[in-house]
Amino acid sequence: MRVEDFLIESATVWPDKVALIAGNQRLTFRDIDRASNRLAASLRREGVVRGDRVVVFMDNGAEAVIAIFGVLKAGAVLSPINPSTQADKLAYVLNNCGARALITIGRLAPVARAALARASSVKMVVAANASAELPDGWIRFEDALAADAALPGPAGITLDLAMLIYTSGSTGFAKGVMMTHQNVVAAATSITTYLEARDDDIVLSVLPLSFDYGLYQVLMAAKVGATLVLEKSFAFPQAILQKIRAEKVTGFPIVPTIAAMLLQMKDLEPGSLPTLRYITNTAAALPVDHIRRLQALFPSARLYSMYGLTECKRCTYLPPDELARRPDSVGIAIPGTEAYVVDQTGARLAPGEVGELVIRGPHVMKGYWENPEATAKALRPGPYEWEKVLYTGDLFRTDEDGFLYFVGRKDDIIKTRGEKVSPKEVENVLHGLSGVREAVVVGIADPLLGSAIKAFVVADPGLLTAQDVLRHCARHLEDFMMPKFVEFRDALPRSDNGKVDRRALAQPALEAAE
C-alpha cells in the first residue's frame, strides 16, 4: 500500500461522506480524490516524474490537502514547508532537495518569488487563492484542477520515497528526513491502532501541515475514513472550542502550548465538550498538574501522552489507563516497534539507568537527504546484521515495568511549540544583524511553549535595542523560531577550551523562569 491509497480506498467506500471541513468548505472523499487526480495529472504534464521532489508551501486549508495527495498520486516526493518560512530558508530547501515544482498560495507569493530567484531546479509553480496577476509561467491552482484527470500507469511501489520532512539540525541547516511509503503506512497503522481510530471519528487539528504531527492527522483520517476539521491555528481558542461543539468533534491533537492555553480559560467548564473521545499530546511532555487538570476538564476523553521524532514519526505512547500510576512517563513503544535505552557502547541498560533511546521498527527513516554523515550518526547497526536502528539523541530511563521516561537531550536542540529549533540556525540570523558581535541562544522552561528561546547578545555599545533584534529575527525566521527574550551582555561566559559555555547561560535563565 502507498500513502495515497488511504484516500483512494476511502473514496471508494465512503464517496459521499464529508472528509474535510476547512473554513467554509466541506469536501467529500470523492471531491478530494477527484481534485487530487487532476492536480497529479497537471504535475505529470508539466514534467514531474516519479521521484521528483515537490514542495508544498501553504497554509492549512482544503487546497493544501488536495496538494498533498496530488503530489503523492503523481509519484513525486512531498515536502511540506511551514508557511512562516522566510525566503532564505525556502531557497535552501528548494536547492537542497532539487525541487522540481512548488505549490503555494497567493499570500506567500512574494516569499516564493524571492526564493525561486535562487532555485533553478524548480520548473513549475502552482498558486492557489491568488487574486493578483501571477508571474509568467505560474499556474493557478484552479486551472491545474481543470485538467484531464487521466493518470498514466502506476505511481510506484511502497519502497519509494513518499516524503522529505525538513527538521532543524545541530549544524544550523535543516535536514531532510527521508520517509518511504512503507515508513508512513507503518507509522499511520500503528498510531491508528492504539488510538482505536474509527470511521465515525471527527478530528479537529490546528497543527500546521508542515509539522508531521499535523500532516498525519490528514493521512490518518483518510486511512480510517474519519472526518478532519482543519483550522489554521489555535490563535482564537474560543472559536476553536465552538467549532468542536458545533461539529461534535471526537478527537483533538494538542501540544503543551495548547494545553496551557486551555487551562488558562476561566469560562471553560468541566464536561463542556462531551463529544471528545480522545486527546493526544506530543512534542513535549505535559506537566503532571496539567494532565490532572485536563482530565478534570474533559472527563469523557481519554488522554494519550506520546513522544516522537520526525525521524520515525512516533516512538512511544502511554496507555490512558496508566496515567494515574505513572503520569510522568511517555509510555511504551507503539505497536509493531521496539524502544530501549542503551549506554555509549550500545549495550542495553537496566531499569533506572539513564542512556540514549533507540528505536527499531518499520517506521524508522531511510536517512537524511544527501547527508551521509548525519545519517551515519543517527542510523547505526541494530541487533541483526541486516538492519539499522535509530539513535534518537534523547536521554531516557525505564522503570521496572519497562515504561519510558524522558530525561533530556544530548545536544542543544530546543523543543518549542512542538517544533525542534537549532540554536545555530537562530544564531546565524542574529549574527547577520549589523552591530551584533556575538550571540548565543538557549532554551528556558516556559509554561506555554514548553521551552522558550532566549538570545544572549553582545553588541556595539548603545547601537541596538531588544526590539531591533526581534524585528530582524521576524524578517528572517519562522515564527516558532523567534526568541521570546533578548538579553544584552558585555561578554559571554566561556569554558576552559574557549567555547561559549551554554550551560552557564542556560542555568540562571532556567532558575529565573521557575
Image (spheres, helix red, strand yellow):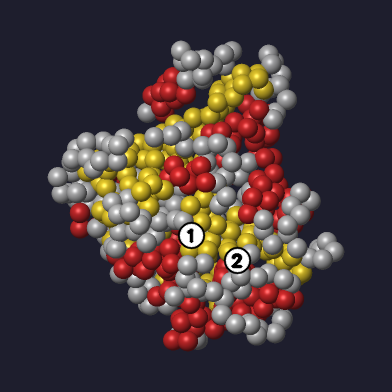
Numbered marks: total: 2
Q: Position of residue 217 (x, y in %)?
A: 45, 64
| Residue closer to the observer: 377 or 264 | 377
Q: Quadrant of the N terminus?
A: bottom left
Task: Name which residue lies at 15% across and 49% down.
Answer: 401
The amino acid sitting under disc 2 is Gly
Of discs 1 and 2, which sits in the foreground?
2
Q: Gap in Å between the C-alphas at discs 1 and 2?
A: 12 Å
Residue that carries the numbered disc 1 in the rendered image:
179
Q: Position of residue 224 (x, y in %)?
A: 40, 75
Task: Name which residue lies at 41% across and 27% down.
Answer: 510
| Residue closer to the observer: 108 or 2 | 2
Q: Position of residue 435 (x, y in %)?
A: 71, 21
- Is the residue 19 above or below the residue 449 in the image? below
Task: Name which residue lies at 67% across and 56% down.
Answer: 98
Residue that carries the numbered disc 2 in the rendered image:
51
Task: Name which residue lies at 51% across and 37% down.
Answer: 170
| Residue closer to the observer: 201 or 456 | 456
Q: Quadrant of the C terminus?
A: top left
The amino acid sitting under disc 1 is Met
| Label 1 close to label 2 by CB (< 8 Å) | no
Q: Position of residue 429 (x, y in %)?
A: 65, 34
Q: How packed is label 1: few (under 14 Cα within 10 Å), some, or many (20 or more)?
A: many
Query: Quick one: SS at disc 1?
Result: strand
- Is the residue 318 above or below the residue 460 in the image? below
Q: Is residue 182 visible?
A: yes
Q: Which mark is residue 34?
A: none
User: From this viewpoint, which residue is outermost toward the front?
Assistant: 385
Query: Quick one: SS at disc 2?
Result: loop
